[in-house]
Amino acid sequence: MSADTGCARDMLVHTADGSWYYRGPGLNGFMPPMMLSNPGTGALKVWVGTQDDRSCRIRMEFLTLLR
């Protein structure tokens, strides 16, 4: 999953089984994609943090692969 915008700095994901995943800024301050190898079933809760607490539009992209 990835947040497609320059203002996104951090992403926090909480899975249905109670696991937490964090992705912070990468090279050039942009957030790299996050890969969850086994998130289980159920809802994902996603928080995206921005620089300087400002608001901005973020387009989330999710890719699902069957194994």
Image (spheres, rainbow, N blue to C red):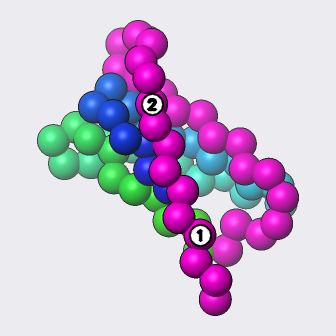
Element at badge 2? loop
Q: Which residues are magenta?
A: 38-67
Q: Which residue is under mark 1?
A: 64
Whether 19 is drawn above or below 24: the answer is below
Label count reads 2
Q: Is residue 48 magenta?
A: yes
Q: Residues within 10 Å of mark 1 (few under 14, many from 20)?
A: few
In this picture, residue 23 sits left or right of residue 51: right
In this picture, residue 10 sits left or right of residue 39: left
Amino acid type of disc 1? Thr
Whether 53 is drawn above or below 4: the answer is above
In this picture, residue 56 sits left or right of residue 62: left
Q: Which quarter shows the C terminus? A: bottom right
Q: Which residue is under mark 2?
A: 58
Residue 30: x %, y % from top left:
26, 41
Which residue sits at x=41%, y=18%?
A: 56
Element at badge 1? loop
The quadrant in which residue 7 appears is top left
Residue 1: x %, y % from top left:
50, 56
Which residue sits at x=58%, y=77%?
A: 65
